[in-house]
Amino acid sequence: MPRQADPVVETPAGAVRGLLDGSGERYRALPYAAPPTGAGRFAPPAPHPGWSGIRDGRRPSPTAPQPARDFGRLDMTPYFGPGWVPGEEYLSVDVHTPAADGARRPVMVFVHGGGFVSGSNRAALYGGSAFARDGVVLVTVNYRLGIPGFLDLAGAPPNRGLLDVLAALGWVHDTIATFGGDPGNVTVFGQSAGATLIGALLATPQAGGLFRRAIIQSGSGTGAFTPEQAQRVTATAAAALGIEATAEAFAPIPDERFLAILPALTGLDLRTDTATDPLAGFSPFSLVLPVQPADALAEGPARDVDLLIGTTTEEGRLYLVPHGALESTTQADLLALATRLHTDPHTALTAQRAAQPDRTPGDLRSALLGQALFEAGTTRMAQAHARLSGGRTHLYSFGYRSTALGGRLGAAHTVELPFVFDNADQPWLHADTRLLGPDPAPAGLAAQVHGAWVAFAATGDPGWATYHPQRPVVETLGG
């Protein structure tokens, strides 16, 4: 008997109508918390009151307030999505399932990146068709960004965007069985800022029991701001708005004003006597924690969670190539970056030059960025998790080089995503100014990478040996 074209599911919050597609059923804009408006933007996520009648789950939700992003000659629309689509009810998830039939399938919950200031689950890269096709229930999450999500304010809980992700995982735990998923077999995964949030979940006691496995793609276990660093951002934001640095003072300010002052916050010098800038000035927002997640795993559920973690081999090129900065980098640029990132910049530069003696200043700048933003924190997180969990850590390195921008983009930050979501053959990814460049994706690479992620979610084994500091097995993907 064929399934109805517009399936209706009864959830604990109310009935919702979805859409049938070639890979299964899709339900969009499902709220996991009440709309964050006014003072509520600076409060913990509140329970959603539910609804009567049948909710239309066939249309996408609004998105969190966010600025437009410019990556020079590279079209990053598939990554950032439509930008800010105004509307109150953006604390929501999309669900793509083979069928809302009561079966117990593996669940994967994706947390998007975007530097803690942008992105949404409406981005084209995060389509769930391949996961549903392969028997996985995919959930993609929106969360608060920028000032409402991460500015550290007196009178407000810190890391509100992280609290949103926790609330979404609570929703998954309570609701996903309705959509054919197994609440006891949840894998949370994310990329960039989303991956850094997942690293924090591993060290968060309240996350215990909400997921069984985690995948950290190009994040960092050492990407959090110290409270002192965060207060520099807060003081600058309050001064730009002409108000006190309290949640009460920020509550009546409209989101448009928050977005308008973001340029004044970008590029702040966050170096202190005890910490360098973990984000190299690229974002004024991150988690705010007294201890980095990689050093606090024993406080959370990490011991009982399988972890798949890795980076691309040329992460830093995304931040240089699209703007022509790879070619224009000078020795002064190199020293300035090393000074921002390291307490001993000259030693750091000497080591980088020794490791890559024939590389251009731009190549060395890219390597410095990749190491500081992603690779060092990934290694530290992998080592800490391996020691704590005893054989439940898998490490990868993604090396396929995009042919975008004359072949210069390479294995940059974000290039692995089309292979994880198995949509690398889509035409909107292929042209000189698009993420994967004019060349077709290598045959079989998307099946390999996507298959490893699905296998890990189902069993905890992506298909290669576990990592340990004394046995540092790293699987090369696409290299």
Image: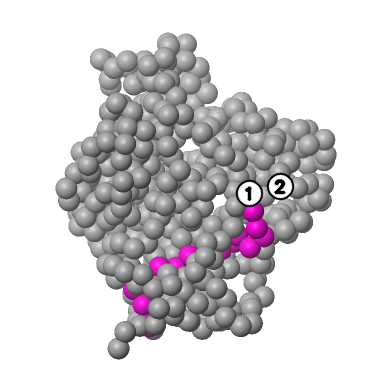
- In the image, residue 53 lies at what x, y percent? 61, 83
Closer to us: 115 or 229: 115
Q: Tell me which residue sits at (22%, 42%) in the image.
A: 440
Q: Secondary structure at mark 2?
A: helix
Question: On residue 65, which mark appears?
Answer: 1
Q: Name which quarter of the figure residue 326 lies in.
A: top left
Q: Tell me which residue sits at (67%, 63%) in the image.
A: 35
Is any atom of residue 366 visible in this view?
yes
Answer left or right for 224 relative to 426: right
- The quadrant the N terminus occupies is bottom left
Give yes or no for residue 94 being in the magenta stretch. Answer: yes
- The part of the chain drawn in magenta is 86-101
Q: CA distance from mark 2 to mark 1?
A: 7 Å
Q: Is residue 466 above or below residue 231?
A: below
Please name the residue that numbered disc 2 is placed on.
255
- The quadrant the C terminus occupies is top left
Q: Are discs 2 and 1 less than 8 Å apart at CB?
A: yes
Residue that extends furthest to the top in the rendered view of this protein: 331
Q: Is residue 139 above or below residue 364?
A: below
The majority secondary structure of the magenta stretch comes to loop
Q: Is residue 312 above or below residue 342?
A: below
Classify 10 Å Cα crowding around label 2: few (below 14), some (14-19), many (20 and above). some
Indicate the colouring scheme: one colour
Q: What type is the residue that disc 1 sits on? A: Pro
Closer to us: 58 or 271: 58
Residue that extends furthest to the left in the rendered view of this protein: 443
- In the image, residue 71 lies at what x, y percent? 47, 32
- In the image, residue 136 lies at what x, y percent? 33, 68
